[in-house]
Amino acid sequence: MSVASFEPVAAVLLIPIGSAALLAALPGYRLTARLNVVASLATFLSALSLLVVERPPPGPYLLVDDLNIVFILLNTFVGFTTSIFSASYIAHELETGRLTPIYLRFYHAMYQIMMFGMNLAFVSNNIGLMWVAVEIATLTTVLMVGIYRTHAALEAAWKYFILGSVGIAFALFGTILVYMAARPVVGEGQDGMVWTLLIEHAVNFDPALLNVAFIFLFLGYGTKVGLAPLHAWLPDAHAEGPTPISAVLSGLLLNVALYALLRFKILLAANPGAIAPGPLMVTIGLISVVFAAFMLYRRRDIKRLFAYSSIEHMGIIVFAFGMGGPLANFAGLLHMVMHSLTKSAIFYAVGHISQIKGTQRISRIRGLTVTHPALGWGLVTGVVAITGLPPLGIFMSEFLVVSSTFARAPLLAIALVFGLLLAFGALTLRLTSVAFGKPRGSTASAEASYVPMFAHLALVLIAGIYLPEPLVVWFQHVARLLG
């Protein structure tokens, strides 16, 4: 492995963990907020360089390939824009007294540790190391969800911790079963957990062990993805934690668990005697879409509303990957990217709204397009995007998912469209009341920057109109890898 090819991979990991140690030692919010932005930008630029430098060959612990570069770039970009949003958002929380300096002592350090955990999960070539990385990211977000130290925030953090621990325990047991299936073929020791070796020899593994392993892995990592009925932690974590963490949860952390599921799906597909993981993913994905669509009508808290929207969209993505094939996999990848960009932009808007109005209750927020035109129309654009209307990017990905499903399983396509229409109705109903009508609540100006929100929405708009050919070719290649 050449030094030049190793450096960007090392930087993607070392910058966050090194920054975390520095941020934990530094006093003062303003300095640490700026350093957090700088560290996140440096990590993103390092990830971007993976596109142009020679990729390092797979090692016993680290791997860079076409699949995980998609996730790494998305993760570091949204991590960077969220750090910008977080700087002004948390500053406002300090000024209003909702947060105190003592509770914020390690906020930015935890942010960087979370980014380190997610990046490590993506580049891991060892399934045990990947499990550890997912757990690191989970534990840091648990601490950040409970940062307000209110009864509701602590309850949400504990619920997240307990359900996340159950999920990660299932995932650990599934990982052990994969090792047991690999041991007779590749031998004792770490070789039985190296991803590239597992794929190479998967055809000779005991299919019965792989089948049981995937069930536990799906339950474990599916809890982290937020799929129904394993979703109970997600709405509370969104509603009670700081809004930057809501943006990271919906835009990034759910993708980490999804990535782990996709890796194990590829492993099962390489063994002809193992069950096809597709039907299980299709079933749970479709249940999540329809369930979340109905639950959207009952939400009275704006952050809980978009938390259930995240459950719906993760259901669409898992459904697409479960259907498999070049077109559905391409649509699933595109939808994952568009959802991360759009949902984080929506949470940026929601964060500004909740600070201006002093509430997250939908009934107390009215007429945003009148009192705060930039913020109101930004939220309108985000909701139009997330409901799948043209010409924004999610329309393209949902159209591809639905059309590929109609070609192969028309009844499933009808059920999927039913869920999408239900969700469209609920979100449109809520948007109408929040964005339009007679203004209600505070009309104070928003002091935070709108740049992260509009940058994401601009990318989603561009993707809905035009996808560059290199990006299409790249996603097509990854879609073929996913089977």
Image (cartoon, rainbow, N blue to C red):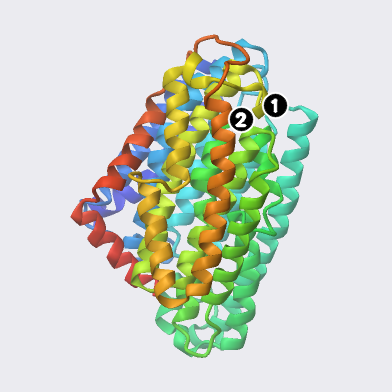
Q: Is residue 170 visible?
A: yes
Q: How packed is label 1: few (under 14 Cα within 10 Å), some, or many (20 or more)?
A: some
If you read the primary sequence from the N terminus, does the residue marked by circle 1 or circle 2 appear first? 1
Q: Quadrant of residue 453?
A: top left
- What numbered label is drawn on residue 203? none
Which residue is found at the position 38% from the left and 45% from the top?
12
Viewed as shown, does residue 259 lie left or right of 329?
Answer: right
Q: Work out which quarter of the rendered image holds the C terminus and state it.
A: bottom left
Q: Dividing the picture into quarters, in which one does residue 167 lie? A: bottom right
Q: Residue at x 31, y 42 (%)?
A: 46
Residue 36 showing in the rendered view: no
Give the camera-side residue of 198 and 436.
436
The residue lying furthest to the front in this view is 437
Question: From the image, which quarter does the N terminus lie in?
Answer: bottom left
Q: Position of residue 239 (x, y in %)?
A: 66, 35
The residue closer to the viewer here, 17 or 155, is 155
- Residue at 75% over, 50% down: 162
Which mark identifies residue 148?
Answer: 1
Q: Evaluate if marks 1 and 2 touch, with contact meaning CB atoms under 8 Å apart.
A: yes
40 lies left or right of 148? left
Three-letter code for the amino acid on which mark 1 is drawn: Tyr
**Other residues around mark 2 within 10 Å, as few (<14) / some (14–19) / many (≥20):** many
Label total for image: 2
Q: Does residue 284 appear to the left or right of 251 in the view shown?
A: right
- Say which residue label 2 marks: 242
Percent across and percent down for residue 307 are: 61, 43
- What residue lies at 51% left-to-right and 65% top-to-bottom? 319
**Spot occupied by residue 416 in the image (x, y as percentages of width and height):** 53, 63
Front residue of 425 and 328: 425
Say what amino acid the circle numbered 2 marks.
Pro
**Element marked by disc 2:** loop
- Report helix, strand or loop for mark 1: loop
